[in-house]
Amino acid sequence: MLKRFMYLDTSALADYVSALEDGVRSSLERQDEKEKATFSDTPQAQFERLLSLAKSETDLAGWFPIGVETDLSEVKVGHLVDTECDIYIPDLVKALSPRGGLADALNLMESIGPAMSVFGVDGMGDLPSREQRDAVKLFSSTLGGSQIAVGELEDCEWRLAGQLAPEYIKSDVEGPARLIGKVSSVWQAGQWKPFLALPGTSLIPRAERRKMERKKPAENERDHYLEGPAFMLDILAIYR
């Protein structure tokens, strides 16, 4: 079946294929009776080889396909997992990303705020404090074009999450899709990880992050957290 990639980390892909093939191939040579031709080794071709190699060398690859009856307690850091899931980008991450426009909106409101006083209106009265506004803009600039994707498994409490590098995003990743990634951390039921403190995006000091993870968030804050049990992944590919 043809694959349509919404996300493909070609750098990690080359590393994985190299490890399994003992050397990255930059081209494939085919010889016929008349001439020698060189065919480009495309990322799609590399990916198909990776799947084939991972399935045949499961121990070396750490290959761990996830199915309906898979015991996910057996998944460990370093495993390369493969699963069908429903993927979404948390609303908080969408809002704080440059594409979400929240930082731009704050900048605009700050710029027009002083002008509102001409009409007898305090244009900054309902805005967050200067410190809060600066924190939002700092996070937005740090996140850049990156996104955090969360995958929910059917009829299973376990969830998966990982950061998406902007240069490898090909199209909208949200919705049912197949996800492959390398497990970088595992946390159990009862643990809560703030989306703003996940690896690669955290601006929260370590001590404060640990404190946040040890307590259950208030009901109105839970959309800002990822609840365990869950895996953090270095996402390799998302496709349909």
Image (cartoon, rainbow, N blue to C red):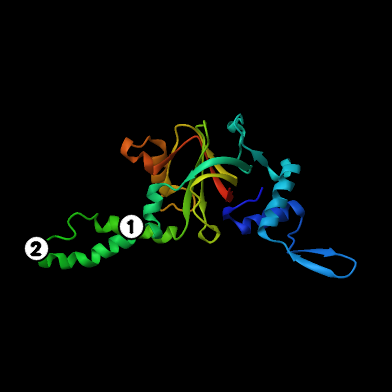
Q: Is residue 6 left or right of residue 97?
A: right
Establish if 130 lies above or below 151.
Answer: below
Seen from the viewer's position, the closer of residues 145 and 45 is 45
x, y percent for residue 33 = 90, 66
Number of the label disc, if any, that sits on residue 24: none
Q: How many callouts does the rendering have?
A: 2
Q: Amino acid at mark 2?
A: Gly
Query: In the image, what residue occupies the spot 77% across and 55% down?
Result: 22
Q: Is residue 77 left or right of residue 30?
A: left
Q: Is residue 138 left or right of residue 81?
A: left
The single residue placed furthest to the right in the displayed view is 33
Q: Secondary structure at mark 1?
A: helix
Q: Secondary structure at mark 2?
A: loop
Mark 2 or mark 1, which is nearer the start of the sequence?
A: 1
Residue that carries the numbered disc 1 in the rendered image: 102
Query: In the image, what residue occupies the spot 70% across and 45% down?
Result: 61
Residue that carries the numbered disc 2 in the rendered image: 120
Q: Amino acid at mark 1?
A: Leu
Establish if 117 lies above or below 54.
Answer: below
Distance Cα–Cα, label 1 vs label 2 = 26 Å
Seen from the viewer's position, the closer of residues 24 and 66 is 66
Can residue 57 be seen? no
x, y percent for residue 232 = 53, 44
Q: In which image quadrant can residue 170 be found?
A: bottom right
Q: How crowded is the residue under tag 1: few (<14 C-alpha within 10 Å), some, or many (20+)?
A: some
Can residue 179 be seen? yes
Query: In the image, what residue occupies the spot 14% across and 60% down?
Result: 122
x, y percent for residue 173 = 51, 50
Q: In which image quadrant can residue 83 be found?
A: top right
Query: In the image, what residue occupies the spot 60% across and 30% down?
Result: 71
